[in-house]
Image (cartoon, rainbow, N blue to C red):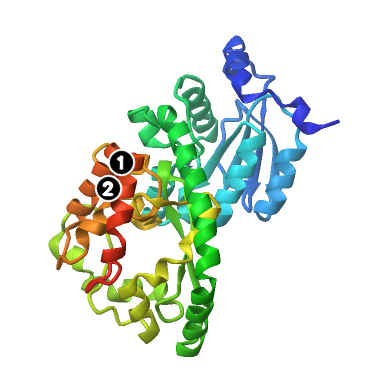
Amino acid sequence: MNLESELIPRENFKRQWFRTSDFFDRPETKLPIFFIESSNASFSNNYIGKRYVAGDFTEAKKQVLAIASHTYRVVVIDIALAVATLERFTSSIKEKTNTIIIYNSRKLTKNEAKFLKAFELVDEVVDIESEDLDLVVKNAIEGKNTSNRKRLYYNSKELRVHGKMKARDFSFFLKKVFDMSVGAVLILLLLPLLILISIAIRLDSKGPIFYSSLRAGRGYKIFKFYKFRTMIKDADKKISELAHLNQYDLTKDGPLFFKLNDDPRVTRVGKFLRNSSLDELPQLFNILLGDMSLVGNRPLPLYEAATLTTNDFVERFSAPAGMTGFWQIKKRGKAEMSVKERVDLDIVYARRASPIFDLYIMANTPAALFQKSQV
């Protein structure tokens, strides 16, 4: 029997659930629970049924999808955080099932717990050994069923707070078609240059040609972001060692951003690529993948994006991620720009985004390619 045919469609599930609103008062109804690595948790055994234990995400996914259930499943994660693996797991599970995902807070640092809550990659972050999981599950399910808000996978706060994204979806679709068409043409035209840059990076220093990292774009969507590598190998691991040199920390101005003047991690070729913005060219592949646009707000590293999830900043993420944008052309030629100025200009773009405004930004980008300070 096809498992998916046994599942209640998402649009019908809420109505089905409200017709059985006495679910939590029915002791014969139990939810299957799946543990990733550990099953040492606290229960009152009112709602939790059969337990399954998996050693990793792959095994857990097979177990979850093998169970035919019209109600919720519960997954408890009790391993160290790996964001990319977690994102793939939650995405694949929630596409086909109604699942409550709980992360054991004992396996997370404070910043990791804050990140998971900010991006809502899981439903709950709790200490599974001290919290009653029955109560946690009940509250999570009731919270889902009483919500009338349309939710993106990452529960975009722009959509929930302002409700503007849906009305602009068609214009963003047209923008994406334009971006992908232009991006494909540019890749073909610039292919010889891309090859020359790749050779120069290889000859200059050890390490891969491309640098990739997880970034947050429109609606807090997380994707893999590509650039030419401009730093020494494993440069990200040295951030904590250089944190005291962070120019934004010196001013304590707004949310956390990380930037160093005369960054010692930058290679010789990398310095030229940064000053000419040629390191950005691989983002044309992000455009072809549909993750970015030619014009938009810069996609932020996750540790930066996690600090911009309050109502004061969330509007920034209603615009797509872009190779160039409003604050970039305003920055060029200026000595410094504060975090507040950057975010304010991003919000201005999100509010004014239009084909004409995009053309204005693109027209001003070529003159700003060569710069004295990296943005």
Identified by mark 1, the residue type is Ala
Residue in the image at 82% along x and 32% along y: 2
Residue 322 screen position, x and y as percent: 39, 53
Residue 325 in sight in this render = no
For mark 1, what is the residue?
350
Left or right of 95 on screen, residue 232: left
Q: CA distance from mark 1 to mark 2?
A: 6 Å
For mark 2, what is the residue?
346
Residue 174 screen position, x and y as percent: 48, 38
The quadrant of the image that shows the C terminus is bottom left
Residue 49 screen position, x and y as percent: 68, 31
Front-lying residue, 157 or 3: 157
Q: From this view, report whether residue 280 is shown above or below residue 262.
A: above
Number of residue marks: 2
Residue 357 in sight in this render = yes
Contact check, label 1 and label 2, Cβ < 8 Å = yes
Which image quarter: residue 277? bottom left
Front-lying residue, 86 or 170: 170
Residue in the image at 32% along x and 40% along y: 353
Residue in the image at 37% along x and 35% along y: 157
Residue lying farthest right?
1
Identified by mark 2, the residue type is Asp
The quadrant of the image that shows the N terminus is top right
